[in-house]
Image: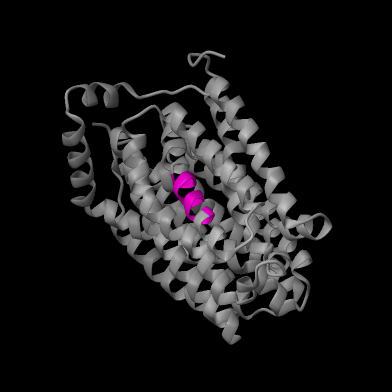
Amino acid sequence: MKIENPKYKWMVVGLLWFVGLLNYLDRQMLSTMRPAMQIDIAELQSAETFGILMSIFLWIYGFMSPVSGVIADRVNRKWLIVFSLFVWSAVTCLMGFADSFTELKWLRGIMGLSEAVYIPAALSLIADYHTSKTRSLAIGIHMTGLYFGQALGGFGATFAKEYSWHQTFYLFGLVGIIYAIVLAVLLREKRVKAAVSTRATESPNTNLLKGVGWLLSNLSFWVILFYFAMPSLPGWATKNWLPTLFSESLGIDMAVAGPIATITIAASSFLGVIMGGIISDKWVQKNIKARVYTSAIGVFLTIPAILILGFGNTTFVLILAAVLFGVGFGMFDANNMPILCQFVPARYRATAYGLMNMTGVFFGAFITSMLGKSSDEGHLGRDFALMSGVVFLVLIIQLAVLKPKVQELED
């Protein structure tokens, strides 16, 4: 299918949807497979040590994210995405051969490097294919792939219990390697004309320094940066610790708690990104601040959800809170790149999203390690609930400062 075909822009979303699914599936499986893996690797019997293993991925992913964004603004994003998928899928296969904590740490680190390349490249590519009329919906649909991957990752413990954790890693790694070949054939690059012409008149080093300097001197970008980061605290907490929280609060086996937690979050987030995308794309045609407002509504919904998740102790209450959190976080997720497009020109967007991803992931690494200690000390729920106050504060700052004047900032 040719790029000029108006349907191809949606084909791009579909192709990247499955990559996003694998991106989150391969990283998420580990969060529910600890009970099976700790039989063979004794160090994983400690929740704090397991939290360290999870956070290694995040720290490396975070450091690599801005580099990935800079690279994505300068090279062919198609091949960057294909390479990223192939490497992390190969690493997933190799996880099945690991027989020591040291080997797991190295492999999680390499996975962090390779997976970090994907998101800035993918979202900037989708943003280039879609105008303001469809951008939030397109980004939202892509994000549902991540949520489905997160949900399937919740079955890691179930697969490990029925077969083995080794075979689980083999299988899903092989799927990704095969799909990387499919993607290499079908995916096409696209650059907006303004970005191409500008790059042609600047040296690479000048372009890099100018881009980073422009972003860091922009107050609106700093607000977007921290607005993106603070909801990442509960966002990463739910990804890495919600199965454990459900297991501890409800007194059920992880093989049951994992799927319940991840499917609930994924299904409700799916609803949230579609709602957030449709509402934002339609509303912004009448109100230029609509993307900011739609995102804010979503973040506001997560605040009571976080409190309930922390202190709830019945299945109904926890599932209800998870649904509320998922819907809110989905509305937030669908509008991050579209909001960025209102404040950052196309040639700097991958770099900008890379910096945002880095900040969000660093907060995620911090909270992942902290909640590991909380779990060992018996107050995981309490510390989970405390995140609601931080999210509320940054929501107020976002509404006070972010005031877009255009649907899409141009060079």
Dominant secondary structure of the residues highlighted in magenta in the image = helix
Q: Residue at x 55, y 36 (%)?
A: 86
Q: Residue at x 58, y 53 (%)?
A: 27
User: Is 65 on the left or on the right of 152, as rendered?
Assistant: left
- The reply to whether residue 58 is visible in this rendering is yes
Q: Residue at x 42, y 30 (%)?
A: 77
Q: Residue at x 80, y 60 (%)?
A: 161
Residue 225 painted magenta: no
Residue 115 painted magenta: yes
Classify the position of the N terminus by image quarter. Answer: top right
User: Is 31 on the left or on the right of 409, as rendered?
Assistant: right
Of 368 and 262, nearer the camera is: 368
Classify the position of the C terminus by image quarter. Answer: top left
- From this view, report whether residue 257 is shown above or below residue 265: below
Of 406 and 240, nearer the camera is: 240
Q: How many marks?
A: 0
Q: How is the image coloured?
A: one colour
Name the outermost residue toward the right. Answer: 162
User: Is 169 on the left or on the right of 106, as rendered?
Assistant: right
Where's residue 391, x and y in %? 44, 68
Q: Which span of residues is magenta-colored?
A: 107-116
Where's residue 248, x and y in %? 70, 78
- The reply to whether residue 288 is visible in this rendering is no
